[in-house]
Structures are given as C-alpha cells and as structure tokens.
Image: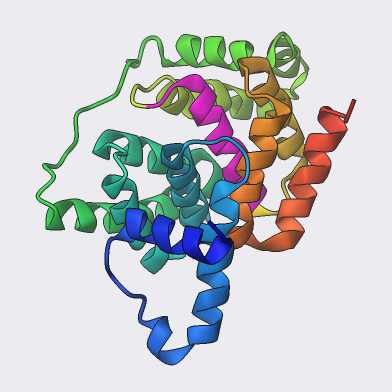
Amino acid sequence: MNRVEKSKEKFQQLFGDGVPTTYSTDPDFQDILSHFIFGEVFYQGNLSDKHRELITLVVLTTNQTLPQLKAHVRAALNIGVTPVEIKEAVYQCAPYIGFPKTLNAMNEVNEVFKAKNIALPVESQKTVDEDNRFDKGLAVQVEIFGDVIEKMQESAPLNQKHIQEYLSAFCFGDFYTRGGLDLKTRELLTLCIISALGGAEGQVKAHVQGNKNVGNDKGTLITAITHCLPYMGFPRTLNAFACINEIIPEN
C-alpha cells in the first residue's frame, strides 16, 4: 500500500467512518495531515497502536488541544485501549503540566466515557498510603535513575529539600506506583510529556537515561518522539532527538 491507502485504512481503524469537518473547508490541509500522520508516522518504528494512542493522548493533554484529545480518546477506545489505561496516561501528566491542565483533560475524557456508558469512576489503581508513599516512590526513583537520587537528596540546600521529598512522594509515590500502566510505559510517556513542554531539555536528558535504565532502547525512544512530531512540531522533536543522541550516542 502507498501512504494514501495506508492513511485511509489507519484512519478508519481509529475513527470509523467519520469524515473530518475540515474536508469541507480545508481539504488540501486535511489531506496533508491525514497522509502524514496516518500514512507515514503511524508506520515508523515498532510501537503498537495502543502505545501510539497513549502517546498521542499525553501530548495533546500537555498541549491542551482538547478537541483533538476528545477525538483520540474515542480512537484509543476503538483500538482496545482500556478506560483505566486512558485515565492513567492522563493522570501521569499532572506532575509535569500541573493540576489545572490535567483536570481540563480529565473533563474531556469523562465526557467521552459518559457518552459511551463507561462507568465512572474507573477502578482505583492506587497502591500506596500516607505511611508508605514516600518510601515506595523513592524505591521507584532509584529503580529508574539509580544511586544519583540519594546524592541529589543529600546535596539539596536545606530550604529546597522539600522539593526532593515532593518528587519522591508525589511524582513517583502517588503516580508511578499506580497500576494500569507498567513502569516502562509510564517512563516512555513521561519522556513524551516533557519533550512536548519545550524548554525542559535537562529533564528530557534525565528521562532518556531513565528510559534506558528500565529497558526502553534507543529505537523505541526515537519512534516515540517521532510519533509526537505531528502534535508538537519539528523544533521540540529535534530538541528531544538531540537529547537522546547525547545520552545514547550512535554506535
């Protein structure tokens, strides 16, 4: 199949028989969009369509492109992504984009779920409590980043140690320990979220190393960031590629 045929097949798989309204107003632009995203990008690399849609959801959440987010929630459900997986992907954005933007995205997800008679709330994926969220979060941090975490906590100025504690208890304890998505998927989604933010190259590099440490190889990272390209543009994509190449040089 050529890319036009591939795009038609992939679009139908994701969205059914619906026709974007832009075909009636901007058909040339919609053709460029559809053929590139669904005829080329979706076929680059070896990620599953489920992982591609999870990546799309977190980048659209980060960018707050909410109408497109709602469409891709439907698409994700159409290809077998579970309601729990969708919710967990959106929740994973909170430490990086803040609560208000995450709540905006959750409202869109909930509207789709209600329209499809998906019961809310979905099954809880919480695995920590007030007594162990810090310790369990710290354990996940160390699993991802290694002994550098202990050194960061020890070297933090006294008036900033609370930030290191928040990272362990909140970012990693409250979110990374949750069920619904495995650690490799959460870390891959995090790389995509912070790449889409722009201006966070230091954190991108750290999470490139984190992805490598949990078993996501360079090819997977290249494919994931390539999948972000249509939603965040070339500048942030190329910046993320530069971070990947710095941390994992070409042989």
Which quarter of the figure has residue 25? bottom left
Residue 12: where, in percent of width, then height? 34, 60
Residue nearest the viewer, comparing 225 with 104: 225
Q: Nearer the viewer, residue 84 or 80?
A: 80
Q: Is residue 161 visible?
A: no
Camera-nearest residue between 94 and 216: 216
Task: Characterize the magenta stretch by its predominant secondary structure.
Answer: helix
Please give the name of the residue rendered at 62% of the width and 38% of the height, measured from the top-left corner.
191
- Residue 76 x, y percent position in the rendering: 34, 47
Image-based side of 115 in relation to 131, left or right: left
Q: Residue at x 58, y 35 (%)?
A: 46
Identify the residue at image location x=62%, y=39%: 45
The picture places residue 157, in percent across and down from the top left corner, at: 75, 24
Q: Which residues are magenta?
A: 181-196
**Is 205 on the left or on the right of 139, as rendered?**
right
- In the image, taking residue 209 as reference, residue 105 lies left or right, namely left
Give the side of residue 17 with respect to residue 214, left or right: left
